[in-house]
Image (cartoon, rainbow, N blue to C red):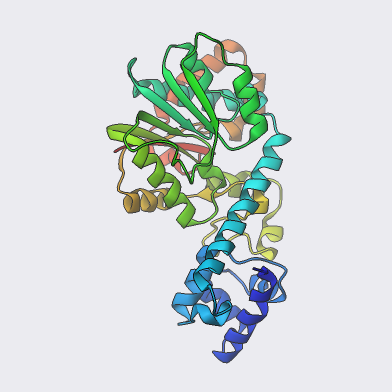
């Protein structure tokens, strides 16, 4: 299916309904008409989720957008193309990015030490642990070194190869290439603890997020724990949009809503959420929250200060951070959050 055929049809439908580009933008949740202009010209894609919204809100038949024959197949192909685009973009990013180095810096250490502490709060020696989106093994390898039975799943082949190079004969760890949206290789109720510490950063529509959480829930035993990491919206608004004077650019490209929520797209690599977004996902999937924490808290706001700290002062910073990271008044402004759920 050629996606550039959709734009002219959307323009035709809009005009037949007597709608302006701005009115259609409002209907579909875009902040201004520029995105509609790009879509109608074929310069930008609509997400699968937005197509469904168009079909529902404008009382449009799928026949109006796609060829009458094999409509379901065409919709599925569109969805698959979008997912493949995300996979390729994420793969290209991580092929050039050193995650291990990030976690060695002071800001990364705050997130890493905090996440590790909370993982250990919910695992027992006999537990089977799976990490979805294991990267180069920053969490999976130490857990395996401690004697845990670990399964690591990683999308990016280069990351997976680095992870495998760290495995020793004494470790009980299996590593596979895989996608958080399809964990069909694993049976229901297979793991005591499921770690989803990266995939939600790179899922750009609600349907995929629901699928990833549902898969994590499916493979987790009843009463087991699921730990899910997110990138939070407000940190980016403050640290990128304002600190780097990008507000006007983001508004021009339709990347900020009227309520100051970043609109993430595949090319931006990372999806950004608010607590209410996370709450809504948990409710739909049927997962119970134990607690949510600010994984790195104010660390990125004080990046330069942290790098200059003496080891003793940094130890005190970690003590302060760990004593406050569960405070709900800090969750929204952290760069990374960790949602701890129970099946």
- In the image, farthest residue toward the top: 170
Residue 10 visible to an observer of this rendering? yes
Which residue is at a point 45% across and 11% down the rendered structure image?
A: 146
* Relative height, residue 89 to residue 100 (above, below): below
Number of disc labels: 0
Which residue is at a point 57% across and 62% down the rendered structure image?
A: 77
Estimate the x, y position of residue 268 in percent, counting from the top left.
66, 50
- In the image, farthest residue toward the front: 69
Estimate the x, y position of residue 226 in percent, counting from the top left.
37, 35
Residue 105 visible to an observer of this rendering? no
Which residue is at a point 60% across and 57% down the rendered structure image?
A: 82
Q: Which image quadrant: the N terminus?
A: bottom right
- Judge by depth and name the residue closer to the eye, 14 or 153: 153
Which residue is at a point 54% across and 49% down the rendered structure image?
A: 203
- Judge by depth and name the residue closer to the eye, 112 or 226: 226
Tell me the quarter of the picture where residue 186 sits.
top left
Estimate the x, y position of residue 64 in percent, counting from the top left.
55, 82
Tell me the quarter of the picture where residue 48 sits.
bottom right
């Amino acid at each position: 299916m050629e996606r550039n055929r959709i734009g002219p049809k959307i323009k035709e439908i809009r005009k037949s309904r007597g709608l302006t580009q701005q009115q259609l933008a409002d209907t579909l949740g875009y902040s201004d008409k520029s995105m509609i202009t790009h879509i109608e010209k074929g310069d930008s894609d609509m997400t699968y989720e937005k197509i469904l919204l168009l079909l529902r809100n404008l009382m449009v038949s799928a026949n109006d957008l796609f060829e009458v024959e094999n409509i379901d197949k065409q919709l599925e192909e569109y969805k698959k193309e979008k997912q493949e685009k995300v996979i390729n973009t994420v793969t290209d990013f991580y092929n050039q990015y050193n995650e291990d180095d990030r976690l060695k810096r002071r800001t990364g250490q705050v997130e890493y030490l905090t996440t590790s502490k909370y993982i250990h709060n919910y695992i027992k020696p006999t537990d089977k642990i799976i990490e979805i989106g294991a990267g180069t093994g920053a969490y999976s390898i130490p857990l395996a070194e401690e004697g845990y039975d670990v399964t690591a799943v990683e999308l990016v082949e280069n990351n997976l190869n680095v992870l495998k190079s760290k495995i020793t004969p004494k470790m009980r760890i299996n590593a596979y290439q895989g996608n958080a949206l399809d964990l069909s290789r694993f049976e229901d109720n297979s793991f005591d603890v499921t770690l989803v510490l990266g995939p939600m950063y790179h899922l750009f529509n609600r349907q995929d997020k629901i699928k990833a959480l549902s898969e994590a829930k499916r493979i987790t035993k009843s009463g087991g724990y699921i730990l899910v990491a997110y990138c939070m919206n407000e940190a980016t608004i403050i640290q990128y949009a304002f600190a780097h004077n990008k507000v006007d650019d983001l508004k021009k490209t339709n990347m900020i809503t009227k309520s100051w929520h970043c609109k993430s797209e595949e090319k931006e690599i990372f999806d950004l959420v608010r607590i209410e977004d996370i709450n809504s996902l948990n409710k739909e999937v049927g997962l119970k929250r134990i607690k949510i924490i600010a994984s790195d808290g104010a660390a990125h706001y004080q990046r330069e200060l942290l790098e200059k700290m003496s080891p003793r002062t940094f130890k005190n910073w970690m003590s302060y951070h760990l004593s406050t990271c569960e405070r709900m008044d800090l969750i929204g402004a952290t760069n990374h959050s960790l949602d701890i759920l129970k099946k």
